[in-house]
Amino acid sequence: MKHLRSISELGSEGLHRILQLTENMAEINSRPVPKVPALRGKTVVSLFFEDSTRTRLSFETAAKRLSAETMTFSVSTSSVNKGESLRDTIETITDMGVHAFVVRHKSVGVPWQIAQWTNASIVNAGDGAHQHPTQALVDCYTVREALGTKDLSGIHLTIVGDIKHSRVARSNIQAFSMLGAKITLVAPPTLLPVNVDHWPVTVSNDLDSVLDKTDVLYMLRLQSERMAQGLVPSLHEYSTRFGLDDERVAKLPSRSVVMHPGPMNRGVEMLIDPSEIPNSLIHRQVTNGVSVRMAVLFDLLSAEELS
Ligand code: NCD
């Protein structure tokens, strides 16, 4: 595999391979010194044109644990502010000798465009509302770990909230479908994409009616920074209809798990403190993010066996 830009590019075989490799990486991360020489001599650049906390830091941690060199590109202090183009930026960094770009950008398709200007591998850390494949890998791995099974066929995944603007939802729908999950989307019509009829999902606008059939409840952040105009009448109404509170948590079957990719909007989609949710996987998602990104970087950059 040369690049990881979307779940469809990864394919079912690649998805299973990365999930398997993540188990090896999790074992490394459980050691007193979680570091192996696997990617010594490789350089990974993180190129984030959009804000990030967990994705950028987990990629950088992952690269370091595999002994790769890391470079961090900070847009706000770079020559982008002097008008340097994306192409010139990529070619300049490539000239320094790098093996992988981890890129996040507000425009859909940037990871594919960049691949034409460099020989390095490209990992998509989020392009607009399009794809965020490593988040989906994290989520599939975390559900398999929590449910104690590699077989997710037939499980009921309910994704709630701002589907329209969510690259996490798009990547997760593809990945969980490949693993055989049954997916329900719950959102107001204004926060659903126009082509949702063609997606392998069921759509509902009544959260309470689907809770008792849900194995995995996946809450999404309301992405106000991507909203051109008020797509919800009021935050209060949105929270009342689509927010997760203690009453809704109580309606979930006892085996159900709750997830959120972060960052959370407390008081909007999350009306309960996650520490009060019995089966919250929100912390496991962050922890597993490092192991998954180690697996991805290793798969892309290593020609050798893991030692
Ligand atoms: C998400 C993103 O940036 O796509 N966050 C993340 O990577 N964990 C989701 C979001 O911003 O709502």
Image (cartoon, rainbow, N blue to C red):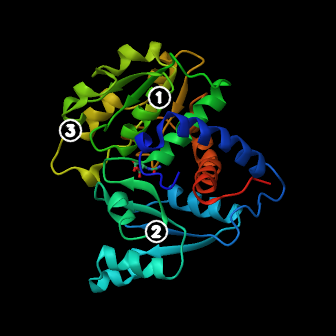
Question: Type of residue at label 1?
Answer: Met
What is the x, y in percent for residue 280? 58, 33
What is the x, y in percent for residue 51? 41, 62
Q: Mark 3 or 1, which is nearer the eye?
A: 1
Quadrant of residue 274 within the rendered picture: top right
**SS class of the residue under badge 1?**
helix
Task: Count the labels in the image.
Answer: 3
**In the image as oriented, which residue stretches furthest toward the left?**
229
Whole-number angstrom distance, CA of label 3 to CA of label 1: 32 Å
Q: Mark 2 or 3, which is nearer the eye?
A: 2
Q: Residue at x 71, y 48 (%)?
A: 25
Position of 275 compared to 249: left or right? Answer: right
Asked whether 33 or 297 is in front, the reply is 297
Q: Residue at x 33, y 29 (%)?
A: 242
**SS class of the residue under badge 2?**
loop
Q: Which residue is mark 3?
A: 232
**SS class of the residue under badge 3?**
loop
Q: Is mark 2 within 8 Å of ligand 1?
A: no
- Location of residue 174 with respect to 288 vertically, above or below: above
Crowding at mark 2 (Cα within 10 Å: few <14, some 14-19, many 20+): some
Report whether residue 184 is seen.
Answer: yes
In the image, which disc is placed on residue 119? 2
Q: Which residue is mark 1?
A: 178
For marks 1 and 2 on the same chain, the one whose residue lies earlier in the sequence: 2
Report whether residue 266 is seen.
Answer: no
